[in-house]
Amino acid sequence: MKKVVSVLSVAALSLSLVLAGCGSKAPEQSQGGQAGQAGGGQAPTMKIGMVTDVGGVNDNSFNQSAWEGLQKLQKDLNMPEDNVKYLQSTGDADYVPNLTQFVKDGWDLTWGIGFLMGDHVKKVATENPNSKLAIIDAVVEAPNVESVVFKEHEGSFLVGVVAASMTKTNKIGFVGGMDVPVIKRFEAGFTAGVKAVKPDAQVIPVYTGFFDKPDVGKSAASQLYGQGVDIIFHAAGSTGDGVFNEAKDRKAKGENVWVIGVDKDQSLTFGKEITLTSMMKRVDEAVYRVSKEVIDGKFEGGKVVSLGLAENGVGLPETSKDTVPADVLKLVDEYKQKIINGEIKVPEEPQK
Amino acid sequence: MNKWRNIFLAESTLVPLAAILLGLLTGALAMLAGGFDPLLAYQSLLKKVFGNAYNFGETIRQITPLIFTGLSVAFAFRTGLFNIGAEGQFIMGMLASVYIGIVFDLPAYIHAPLAILAGALAGGLWGAIAGYLKAARGVHEVITTIMMNWIALYLANYILASFLVPEGKQNSEPVKETAVITIGWLSQMFDSARLHWGTLLALIAAVVFYVLLWKTKLGFELRAVGFNPHASEYAGMNVNKNVVNAMLIGGMFAGIGGACETLGVFHYMSISAAMPGYGMDGIAVALIGGNTPLGVILGAILFGMLSFGASGMKFGAGVPVELIRVVIASVIFFVAAHGIVRYLLKPVLAKQKEGS
């Protein structure tokens, strides 16, 4: 009897799965078809893919920003939904196969997001000279790759101005991901901005070594706040999520601490109670712009685009007016003009 | 004809096969719950793995290190040791080989073998430290190997940053052309997939694994200690020595794996915030393979296909990476918990007994 029951149960399980599988497939497919038809007509049929680095597409940071840029493009131009796609990488070994997947599949543009992918984009671009690729945060010298870099130091200078104007303890923290040139630019600009307003304020930098470990970010933040720091600027991908968590805990206990977000307007994710402002890096804009160029047939391989304050590639979000007093924002605008005019030259490397 | 049928229906074949099937079914349930199409997902997985020469080659690339780390874990397990440290041994293998590959200037026929040998030694010694601590001080190897993993990661990062990586870069210099073990013509055949001699070495390592454990005196002792250390000691074997040996040899397998990864795939080593993960996956591979050499190879093939094909599931069916890990985990779960499978298969197996 027992045997019969177990046989039946296995059979029933597998049968129900098979049936359920078939059942769900049919409507989904037809939906996809309709969406495709609705998007047809005038909409471009170009296909644009992107490969995230290990941070993943939900990193609340530049990978996510890039994906939002692509999604916006797809909606704006009414492209079929399947014509923009991302692949997530789980390690070094994944970059080349993921990039190659898009390239070999004949996608019109393939994005590599993040400086970690520099060498890999170069390899794939060289092996597939007829493909088009683009990369964020690294310069790849190849005739079929467009590189986009940001002047993070300029934007960081401005949030440094905000931090220096708002600090009560005169101690300001910086939490970086890996100790690499891109992140160094954040620290350099930030410190310069702080010193410009308050030469005696102290900036304490901490490098966690990770872009994807919120727990490590939390303990780094705890250490800094423990030392009397009241504002932390993070440039550490999803490691920075931990900085926000720590600030939230302390705010709940009545401490007056702030976080300055990075890459995106992080007050939207973490709330205005703890997010003072954010150093927005418009990865979404860059992805949108270059992808649009491909669609319009204006893609320029080998070009390096460098986006700073003047190009609106970096800056503070609109929402900062709710958390930062108007006179501070005015000061920020003054410095912004000076940087654009070239009166102030923001250093790219931290001063020793 | 009948013989083939018997092999296919033998318990040792049937149980793992059923386990994999159950795992895939459970994964399918998870995908359904998430609103994705499991049939399309599995189709995309197969298409990704077998769809074209490039991806097939890359799947082999993915499988190779898993064979090494799987053998490493399985070998120690035969002596009753749980080697969680294949990860660290793998990293040390990478480090040693990349060091030899960059710093030395030698003709190809000696440079590459030397670099691999260095990788084997580094991985072996790294494992032997844990073995020694166990033998001399009774420190449990699970604790030490886990800790040694982190030490390896940060030691490697430190050495790379201090000696091998140019200022402001993330990757070390490439190893010299003479130390590279990529097979150019084969790569070309597979549309420049990164294929290398390490795959052949992995298969040889599996043979060595078998010969060493089952055809030598050393292997007999190692296995005896694994079955019952007290009885082995009573029989006059030196248990402590065997513990160190098992970790040393197990570590060497992982170390060679690391060396092949740098010399064959990347040609450099990068300062990395996270472990490569092959060591941890190796535990699962050894488990799936029942700690036998052939089983490890098959387990690595399954695991490599699943993890490389995962991006195909994302690409073809939109299944997010997290859900794909659920699928992989449920396969491992059923393979590891074969008691459940055996219970479900009872009627089939009982019928066979009657038949034979």
Image (cartoon, helix red, strand yellow):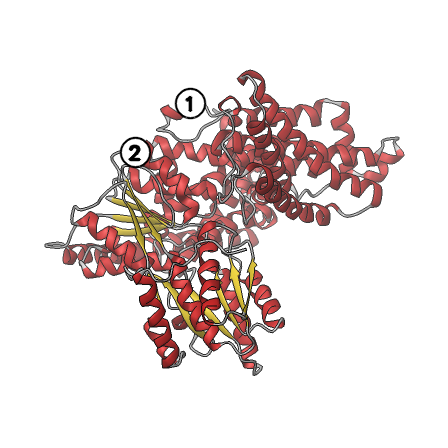
The residue most toward the bottom is A254
Outermost residue on the front side: it is A343
Image quadrant in which you'd find residue A279: bottom left
Please say if B353 is above or below A156: above
Disc 2 marks which amino acid? Asn
Q: x%, y% of residue A268?
A: 38, 72
Q: Residue at x 37, y 24 (%)?
A: B188
Mark 1 is on which residue type?
Gly
- Which chain letter matches label 2? A
> Viewed as shown, does residue B96 lie left or right of A325?
right
Whole-percent x and y of residue B164? Answer: 56, 36
Q: Nearer the viewer, residue B196 or B219?
A: B196
In the depicted view, which residue is nearer to us: A253 or A25? A253
Label ID, residue B302: none
Q: Under tag 1, what secondary structure? A: helix
The image shows residue A248 at horizontal and vertical percentages of: 52, 75
The disc at residue B184 is 1
Residue for badge 2? A128
The answer to the question of whether label 1 and label 2 lie on touching residues, with beta carbons closer than 8 A, is: no
Q: Which quarter of the figure has residue A193?
A: bottom left
Tell which of B118 and B32 is nearer to you.
B118
Q: Chain of mark 1?
A: B
Real-space CA distance between mark 1 and mark 2, rounded to the nearest whole angstrom? 17 Å
Asked whether, in this view, residue A106 is left or right of residue B39, the answer is: left
Residue at disc 2, secondary structure: loop
